[in-house]
Image (tube, rainbow, N blue to C red):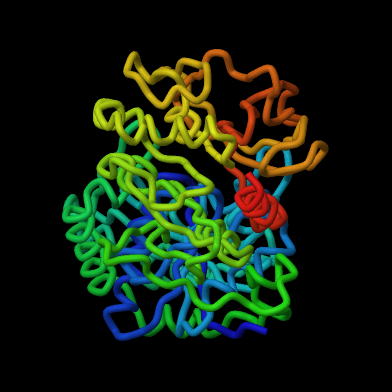
Amino acid sequence: MSSVPRLVVAAPSSGSGKTTVATGLMAAFAGRGLRVSPHKVGPDYIDPGYHALATGRTGRNLDAYLCGPDLVGPLFAHGALGCDIAVVEGVMGLYDGAAGEGELASTAHVAKLLRAPVVLVVDASSQSRSVAALVHGFASWDPEVRIGGVILNKVASDRHEELLRDALDSSGVPVLGVLRRAPQVDTPSRHLGLVPVAERRAEAVAAVAAMAAQVAEGCDLDALAALARSAGVLSGAAWDAAEALGVATPSPPLRPERPRPQTPDGLDVVGRDRKAPVVAVAGGPAFTFSYAEHTELLAAAGAEVVPFDPLHDEQLPAGTSGLVIGGGFPEVYAPELSANEPLRKAVAELASAGAPVAAECAGLLYLARELDGRPMCGVIDAVARMDERLTLGYRDAVALGDSVLAAAGTRMRGHEFHRTVVEPGAGTSPAWGMRAPERRVEGFVQQGVHASYLHTHWASEPGVARRFVERCLTS
């Protein structure tokens, strides 16, 4: 059971200031000496990096589509173990979920699964009295969603604030914060959203500090903490990687391999035993997209997980017997990745030897023959390039053949998020058959390589990690 105080930060729509408020609130609570557990609704990898910077803890995702509703509570409890309070940043608008799936994976859905009150962040920059109608509509739409307060963002002046407060007096939803426009808390964006922390750490530290100061000054932290304490008790045990894999004895805590700069993506950890198969996991500024549960599952399955940075490391970690390359922005770092010829050659040799290699999205681009005209690893006979069209959305997929990750017929839900194209889009042995929203084949399976655009969450199918580590032992 989990009784960790918690609240969900939501908004009527994207662009209202959820990330600023949620991250600032996390940092403000941490500044009071509280152990804050940071969470993000949905598949987004970038916001959790800012959350980790604000709290000093790994930012974790809660996705009812990728993992299923039944895992939301256990995964939350796992991340919140030992914490004093949890802050969950929502996704899109409060009631926006997976397309065509009703409330599934919406912020409202996750708030109900967590029995957590919602704080609604409203961009008040172009309204006054109308704010009351907006808040009333959101508060009354679903009686199972409890909106416990409003934070008014981008308020222009004292007079504007007075008008907004007067309008909301009769709404029954208290105003828990008022934030003025503040350019110093802005974070730069590009083709896939915010620039990750790993690419601008010094500037990100300053931005998070500014967010914390703004929230601490403009919000009633005591009232917000009291609201968090009103959350209902969650029944059931916290998720545990070893238990998910059916391991008899839980793995010891992951330990540092060697002193490294702290990363926001949870990859600065390794497994437990020098005799265990070494699984190298790509990290650094070019490969920042990874769910923390993946490394936890690999370690629980018996692997020694060692991070490396393809931008700077010229060799794979010593003894590497398996390779995981997640998502990120190789298109931004194509010149540097291409210039690191020794590592590209090492990756190609490892794959050629039949070692297990799992690559998602950015990893697929890195394994291709070239990216935007620059040589990459050449493991996959395909060419990757930037594209104007954004590919975005949840996918329902089935494994079309046996691979190092899954047996043929294994169904997994995933997410695509990229502005690149790989030609051809699938090999002679595709990785996945997409069942929804459109039927198509995608990705590459060859020897020990599984490369695809599809991001998956292994907590939904823990056997993926076990199968991968077993292949490391036998390849």
Viewer-closest of 148 and 14: 14
* Residue that lies at the very extreme toward the right in this rendered image: 409
- Quarter of the image for residue 416 reads top right
Q: At 42% from the left edge and 57% from the top edge, which residue is drawn? A: 306
| Picture quarter with the C terminus | top right
Q: Is residue 152 visible to us here?
A: no
Viewer-closest of 350 and 208: 350
| Picture quarter with the N terminus | bottom right
Viewer-closest of 163 and 175: 175
- Quarter of the image for residue 355 reads top right
- Quarter of the image for residue 152 reads bottom left
Q: At 47% from the left edge and 60% from the top edge, which residue is drawn? A: 89
Q: Residue 314 appears at what percent x and percent y?
A: 28, 40
Q: At 48% from the left edge and 59% from the top edge, which residue is drawn? A: 305
Q: Residue 249 appears at what percent x and percent y?
A: 67, 79
Q: Is residue 32 left or right of 138 when viewed as pictured? A: left
Q: Is residue 334 left or right of 113 when viewed as pictured? A: left
Q: Residue 284 appears at what percent x and percent y?
A: 32, 48
Q: Residue 186 appears at what percent x and percent y?
A: 24, 49
